[in-house]
Every structure is written in C-alpha cells, then in structure tokens.
Amino acid sequence: MFALVLIRYRRPIEEVVAATDDHRKYLRDLHARGILLISGPFDPRSGGALILRLPDEDAEGALDAIRDADPFWQRGIANYELLKWNPNIGAEALR
C-alpha cells in the first residue's frame, strides 16, 4: 500500500523554518527505514508532500502514527491530509 501525504503550513514561515531541521531529520529516518520514498516542499513554500510505502495491514493506523510522530504535527506547524493511494501507471518504479 502507498500513501500520499499533503502537508499545509498553518504557522508563519519563520516558525516553519525553525522546525524544519527536526522535521527533515524525522523524514530521513523514515526514508532509511524504507517508509518514505520521496518528499519535498511546494513551490511557493506553502507546505509539502510525501509519498510513503505502508504495510497492507492497518495502513490507516500506520499513517496516523507517521503523522503523529512528525515534529511539524507535534508543534502545530502544519495540517496533514492523509490519502491511501493505489498507483497503477508507473507503479513498478515504486516497488
């Protein structure tokens, strides 16, 4: 199972910047564990997106846990839209 996470900032950019190193450290850990496939900020910088690989069982629970552990979420920096995703065309590139 895959997921797309849309992150939208809800605090001033100065607060976002102050928390970005911790957020990216968290994302690097998810990437090292094979959960995060790709991430990056939007342009202009109003938030960002993540593409995740999740276990098929309890994908929603895994998504909630990933969001809940993110420093942006914990500090009230951003809102998260969590979307389970079933890619088809080009999906082989994600495997």
Image (cartoon, helix red, strand yellow):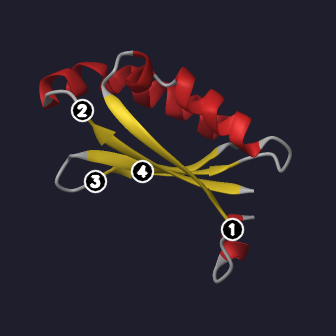
Q: Nearer the viewer, mark 2 or mark 3?
A: 2
Q: Residues within 10 Å of mark 1 (few under 14, many from 20)?
A: few
Q: Nearer the viewer, mark 2 or mark 4?
A: 2
CA gap, disc 2 and disc 3: 14 Å
Is the residue under label 3 in contact with that under label 4 (CB below 8 Å)?
yes
CA gap, disc 4 and disc 3: 7 Å
Q: Quadrant of residue 24?
A: top left
CA gap, disc 2 and disc 4: 15 Å
Which residue does the image show at 43% across and 39% down from the upper left? 80
Q: Say whether residue 54 is left or right of residue 36.
A: right
Find residue 88 and report its horizontal and vertical position in percent.
68, 79
Is the residue under label 1 in contact with that under label 4 (CB below 8 Å)?
no
Q: Mark 1 highlights which residue?
A: 86
Which residue does the image show at 35% across and 23% down from the upper left? 21
- 6 in relation to 23, above or below: below
CA gap, disc 1 and disc 3: 22 Å
- Residue type, numbered disc 3: Phe
Q: Mark 2 highlights which residue?
A: 10
- Residue type, numbered disc 2: Arg
Which residue does the image show at 30% across and 25% down from the upper left? 77
Among the two numbered marks 2 and 4 on one chain, the one whose residue lies closer to the N terminus: 2
- Residue type, numbered disc 4: Ala
Q: Mark 4 highlights which residue?
A: 49
Mark sitting on residue 42: 3
Among the two numbered marks 4 and 1 on one chain, the one whose residue lies closer to the N terminus: 4
